[in-house]
Amino acid sequence: MTKQKYNVLFLCTGNSARSIMAEVLMNHWAGERFQGFSAGSFPKDDVHPLSLKFLESMNLETHSLRSKSWDEFIGDQAPQMDFVFTVCDNAATETCPIWIGSPMTAHWGIADPAAAEGSETQKLAAFRTAFRELESRIRLFADLPLATLDKMSLQREIDKIGQNKAG
C-alpha cells in the first residue's frame, strides 16, 4: 500500500525568498511524503538573487524555481492542497493572501530576509536565519504522525510549529 503524498503550499507576498526557500526545503526533507509548492499574493518578477545564491550554497536544487501568483493554485486545474502555510512575518504590515478552501492552514511568520539591509554578508545572514527557521519548522511538520492525529490535534500541532524559531 502506498502512502498518500500531501500537497503543501507556502504563501507570501512576493514569492521570492521565504516561500521559495520553504518549497525547496519541503521537497528536500520530505519529498517522499509531501510535495511543496510556493506562491505569492503579489509575486515579484524573479526569485530574489540572494535566495538562489543561498540555496545553491546549501547544494539545493534551484533551476526550476520561479516567482508565481497564488492564483495558479486556484481552480479545477490546480493541484488540491492539503496544507497552506503563510510565511509573511507580520500580517499587520504585509499583504498576505487569505486561502479559501478546505486545506489545513497555519501562519508560520518569518522575518523577510529580502528586506535586510547592510553588506552582502549581513544580508546573507538574514537569509541563513530565515532558512534555519523554515528548515526547523518543516522538519517538525514532516515528523508529525499525520495518520494518528485528529483534525483538532493536527491544527494545534501546526500552529505550535509556527511558534518555533529554530532548531
Image (cartoon, rainbow, N blue to C red):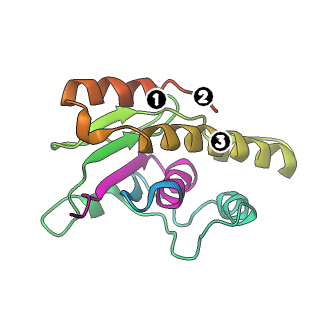
Along the polypeptide, which appears first: circle 3 or circle 1?
Answer: 3
Q: Name the side, left or right, on which 51 lies relative to 80.
A: right
- 29 relative to 111, above or below: below
Q: What secondary structure is found at the residue carrying circle 2?
A: loop
- Could you classify mark 3 by the number of other residues whose Cα lies within 10 Å: few (under 14), some (14-19), or many (20 or more)? some
Which residue is located at x 65 percent, y 41 percent? 132
**Rendering coords of residue 160 (x, y %):** 42, 23
**Rendering coords of residue 141 (x, y %):** 43, 39
Q: Was residue 3 drawn as part of the magenta stretch in this picture? A: yes
Name the one closer to the observer, 106 or 4.
Answer: 4
Residue 42 visible in the shown view: yes
Residue 112, quarter of the rendered image? top right
Q: Which residue is mark 3?
A: 132
Residue 41 visible in the shown view: no
Name the one closer to the observer, 160 or 109.
Answer: 160
- Could you classify mark 1 by the number of other residues whose Cα lies within 10 Å: few (under 14), some (14-19), or many (20 or more)? many
Q: Was residue 58 drawn as part of the magenta stretch in this picture? A: no
Quarter in which the N terminus is drawn:
bottom left
Quarter in which the C terminus is drawn:
top right
**Rendering coords of residue 144 (x, y %):** 38, 37
Which residue is located at x 36 percent, y 52 percent? 9
Residue flagged by tag 2: what amino acid is it?
A: Lys
Magenta part of the chain = 1-28
Along the polypeptide, which appears first: circle 3 or circle 2?
Answer: 3
Q: Which residue is mark 2?
A: 165
Residue flagged by tag 3: what amino acid is it?
A: Arg
Q: Name the side, left or right, on which 43 lies relative to 135.
A: left
Which residue is located at x 19 percent, y 42 percent? 100
Measure the alpha-carbon separation of dots 3 and 2: 8 Å
Q: Which mark is residue 162?
A: 1
Residue flagged by tag 1: what amino acid is it?
A: Gly
